[in-house]
Amino acid sequence: MRKILLTLLFALFGTTAYADGHCSKPSGSINILANDFPALRTFVETAKGCKGSADFKVTHSSEHNKIAVPALTANPSEFSARIAANSSIVPLMNQDLIRPMDDLVKKYGKGIQDSQLITIDGKVMAVAFMANTQHLYYREDVLKELGIPVPKTYEEVVAASEKIRASGKMQHPYAAAYKAGWNLAEEFVNMFIGHGGEFFKAGTAEPNINNAKGVATLNMLKKLASLSNPDYLTHDSEAIKVEWESGKVALMTLWASRSGTLLDDEGDAKITAATKLTGPATVGGGSIPAATLWWDGFTLAKNRSDSDAEATFIALAHAASNKKMVADAADQAVWLVEGFVPGPKSIGVIEAVKMGAKPYPMLPQMGLMHGALGSEIVEFLQGKESAEQALKDVEAAYISKAKEQGFL
Amino acid sequence: MPNKTFFWFFLPTGLAMILFIGLPIISTGIQSFYAQHDQVVKEVKKCDPFGCTVSIVVDQEATSILRDEKPLGKFNGFGTYIDRNHLAIEQISDFWKETDSFGEFINQVTNLPFYKALLFTLTYCLFVTPNVLLLGFIIALSLNAISRKIRGPLIFGTILPMIVTPLVGSLVLFWMIDAEGIIGANLQLMMEDPYLSLKSSRTLTWITIIIYGIWHHSPFAFVVFYAALQTVPQEPVEAAIIDGASRYQRIRHIVLPHIYPVVTFVALISLMDNFRVFEPIIGFSAEGSAQSLSWLIYDNLVNEEVILFGSAAATSMMTIIGIAILLAPVLIRTWKEFRTAR
């Protein structure tokens, strides 16, 4: 009898704990650095629900990339955890600023699925909780009216945009975040991968973009840019979102994580109702989409006491395995957490994964390439130099930087 | 002032200057001669939610041994200074050999990041500084001539551009000149060209930033000139009026010589400020079309996920040298005058 009671109690306790996501009431000091968008705010709020007696602080900033390395280099570091992504984990790895968390995962990470673990050389360096990518958004009403099918390739996007322009409905029917710098480089990365390009010669840090694939990539970017608002070089994701909401754009490449604010109740109800999502487009007859897959996950600072790391892990793991959070905030992101039921806003990412999209390259020297792309391809888009010259400049700028950093 | 008094008087300032200006510059200078150690990389298996791949990471154990031995990095001498992203000595000599015409050569050189930035920085200095001096002087003269009753509010209005935070000022203008903004859209209407954009054309972006620079810096020149105008003695001016000198002649022969040292001062400060032009580039999101030396430093430090300390330090040192060269003529002249005055 007693045994049955115990079993029952255990089962009961077990399930409640599971529904909550485990929380073993940590103590110590927790300080988190994260980017600033709704899904991450939800995630950190959920983690806060399991802070126990610990001191809980969080910094949400869109400038997180600029503070991360200096703040984590200090000893003890300012932050005990950093919410990172494929690209932003690389500088942390390069500088040896984050700690492996295998033992913590074993001890406290019961609800975390294996697929959430980012392992490098067999060690768990991050725990992912959401996925992101850029994909197509379209205005159903505009496409229907002109009898245009939903584009599946960028060639079709170009044709559709030209048709819309010719109809006189919209002057600049296409939009993507082409702001010179990081954003523009990201579009190049997507398009280059869509063409089947490899950024570096196999096994080395030698650049490999000055070729036919690079030229095709640039030409496609230029074609799309000519169908965008002429100020495209100054427009980031937020700016094109505003353009979309003002009804001046019918086709757009944008982050999946922005769909939540794009489809909320604010703004023109007609435009919101006609806004539809579809997978990322392919390009140049390729089969994989011209897009990169991203994950967002948490990492733990190395230069921080073990007890703080433990407390931080307990709180964040609570959120990273929280079924209630993913059910309540199903609209905000494509959660990688168990129990997530994808809604209509997750179509883009799910399609991208189905189509075999590649993740953003997690290479130590990729940041330098990204930086060189962001500033050197601008003159090509402005029509000031040839594609070959622009790619030659990118490679030369990259090589100088890579030499200074000791990669070449 | 006896030298000893001067010494004790200057000591606190001097110490602060050494601590907060001298030492950081020396440290930056040392930094600019070093590059990162050669990265030791190894192939490992990486797994994420999207699958596993084999690729490279930095080998931390091997790297930390190197770092502990030489924490400053690998000595690179002037290597960073002469690489492609800075002075690009090698590339320029190649261009010289390869190109047929001088125009083509200049084209190639100004395509290099450092020279591109230098070209913009110098153009900005060259257009903004004289215009700021001129505009500031004209405003000061005009305000000095009007009734005292309305002078207060007018002066306040005139120095507003200086009070407005540079970034905010440029952002306001940035939104106005957007293709959908009030100035941008009206320009398109006036020119009947729906593709006209102040932000996408390099020349127009440069002009916008230069006009913004003049707007922002003129009040400073105005305030200083206005103060100087109050010290112009009235007797010679009145004498000149009796002699029948025109207003222009009075300004040319009495007012200007009197406030000449102040003009030099404003010119110096303006040149220094303008050579470090930075905020409008960020405010106008003009990185694509206009890059300055200060922007290059910023880019090396924050825009990449990998921080390029050596590059940033080298550009900083060259900016300091650049300012010194620009200021040299004015400084030499002031020094000579100081000598003759003694």
Image: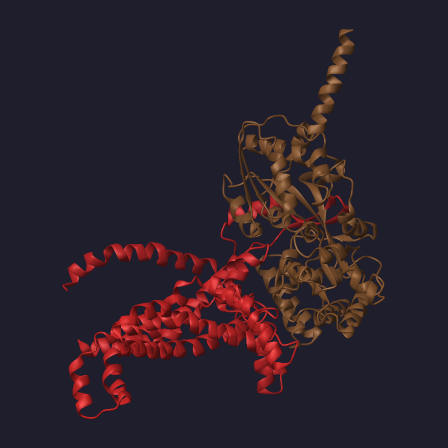
Chain colours: A brown, B red
Q: Identify which residue, B160 or A168, lies in the foreground.
A: A168
Which residue reaches farthest bottom?
A: B244
Q: Residue at coordinates 37% horizontally, 56% vertically from top-left?
A: B23
Residue B69 in the image: x percent, y percent?
51, 47
In which image quadrant can residue B98 be found? bottom right
Residue A195 appears in the figure? no
- For the C terminus of chain B, the image quarter is bottom left
Q: Is residue A342 above or below residue B218?
A: above
Residue B243 appears in the figure? yes
In which image quadrant can residue B90 be found? bottom right
Residue A220 in the image: x percent, y percent?
75, 69
Q: Identify which residue, A277 or A50, lies in the foreground.
A: A277
- For the N terminus of chain B, the image quarter is bottom left
Q: Identify which residue, A117 or A61, lies in the foreground.
A: A61
Residue A387 in the image: x percent, y percent?
70, 73
Which residue reaches farthest top?
A: A1
Q: Left or right of A232: which side holds B244?
A: left
Q: Is residue A38 above or below residue A9?
A: below
In which image quadrant can residue A249 be found? bottom right
Q: Is residue B43 above or below residue B315?
A: above
Residue B229 in the image: x percent, y percent?
25, 76
Q: Is residue A250 above or below residue B92?
A: above
Q: Identify which residue, A122 or A350, lies in the foreground.
A: A350
